[in-house]
Amino acid sequence: MKRAFDELKPYLDQAMALNTALVLFEWDNETLAPEEAGGLTGRVIGLLSGQYFQAVNNEQVVALAKQCEAEGNLTEAEAAQVKELEKELEKLSHIPRKEYEEFARLTAESTRVWAKAKETNDFSCFAPVLKKVLEYQKKFAGYRAKAGEKLMDVMLKDYEPGFTTELLDQFFDVIRREIVPLFHEVRDSKVQIPDEFLTGDFSDETQEKIGRFVAEYTGFDFRKGVMAVSAHPFTTNLHNKDVRITTHYTNRLDSSLFSIIHETGHAIYEFGIRDDLTQTMVGQGASMAMHESQSRFFENIIGRSRSFWEPIYPKLQEAFSENLGKVSLEEFVKAVNKAQAGLIRTEADELTYSLHILVRYELEKELIEGNLQVEDLPGAWADKYEEYLGIRPETVAEGVLQDIHWSQGSFGYFPSYALGNAFGAQLYYHMKKEMDIDGLLAAGKLSVIRDYLREHVHQYGKLKDSRQILKDATGEDFDPGYYVKYLKEKYKALYQLS
């Protein structure tokens, strides 16, 4: 007798193929697609999204999923796929297909409107489409919400299962109480860290060459991945044998360099997912925050350490000899760890980064709860930056328009960045008990670190949620105290604070 899961698998494969096509369109849209392509390509994306919707959300799939549960003769991977399918069915079954397709078309176009608005520094042309995106997401969350459930909590489930606004409010309260005062201490410190040598007229070609070297050194496998350029660096994957990262090139040497290390961290996660899970509904990272924990672990905890650069700094000096030729390794490491108030999240240092996320989290809550209107976002954004970082953006391009996320409908995504920092710190302190991290880095043995993370985090995909991965890897539930400890140890030493 044929098992229900064997009958279900062709439907899952069809949904996977359609989703893969949509991922390719997203990649193309952000990297190579011509400016005028948006409207017509958006139509194709809408149709494919509708087909995906139908492939997952139909009577046969619903019946087979229930039959799988009843039979119970599933492997670990099969059971996880059925569980993930049920989550997707719970989400899609409440949304009319027509509205689902309309939203897919809207977000395909809204990202282009956002890009144009940012380029022209004009929030007014983006506000109407952002309002539509927000309305759709609130409507969709309303369809799915259980009695008394907050819309924000519904949205958070798509990115961070196991975390609610109640838990996030507690986490961000720790950020306010511990990190904001620490930043003020650093800001008022008399210690000066020169970093002018990081700015210069660097050619794209040289930045790309050294970027590819650093990516490969960190762990990016160019046999299974590619690197391109986009306005907003990101990582996407089709499966564990096709992972794609992007970067951008500016007059700041460290900007592209560390964005590449960051995206490589994401890619290492995707490369490490088990072969029996890839190209299934559980063949991605456990959550957005767990993914961010890996990218920011490699970018900051590993990539900004002295021991990481010890074996390869001469190669960096050679590539950028005019700027770095006479700069010692110690001076370089201090410069790339310098903390200062800035307006751009993606360029923020470790200490201030989560303050950028705090601003976005508070604004998202106000938007979703109806306490803030889209038209008032620029002013509210500037006020929050002044409150937490002591600076105000002079333009909307460096303010509310700097991120692509809301144009994509990704409300509830931003907290994952701050949680990822905290997850990474918790993993780091546990790993220090297991291995000599600095010694391994100084010897160029990053593979030992990657193998450990593959064994304890990467291989599982979505078989476990982020909190379970932390419990199994460290023996503890999520504890933001490790993040506070990490930042205090690092920045008190760097800025000679008592």
Image (cartoon, rainbow, N blue to C red):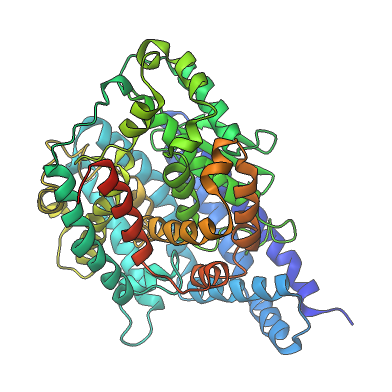
Assign the N terminus to one quadrant of the image: bottom right
Using the rendered view, name the quadrant where residue 455 is placed. bottom right
Picture layout, residue 306 above or below residue 491: above
Q: Relative to the observer, which residue lies in front, 446 or 397?
A: 446
Residue 22 on image: x %, y %: 56, 49
Left or right: 389 with respect to 325?
left
Question: Among all residues in the image, which is located at the extreme right?
Answer: 1
Residue 203 on image: x %, y %: 42, 14
Using the rendered view, name the quadrant where residue 140 is placed. bottom left
Q: Relative to the observer, which residue lies in front, 7 or 221?
A: 221
Left or right: 374 with respect to 129?
left
Left or right: 101 with respect to 65?
left
Residue 360 on image: x %, y %: 25, 56
Residue 319 on image: x %, y %: 48, 15
Query: What residue appears at the point 36 percent right and 27 percent down from the top-left corner?
Result: 332
Q: Relative to the observer, which residue lies in front, 105 or 167?
A: 167
Q: Is residue 314 visible?
A: yes
Q: Relative to the observer, which residue lies in front, 132 or 85?
A: 85
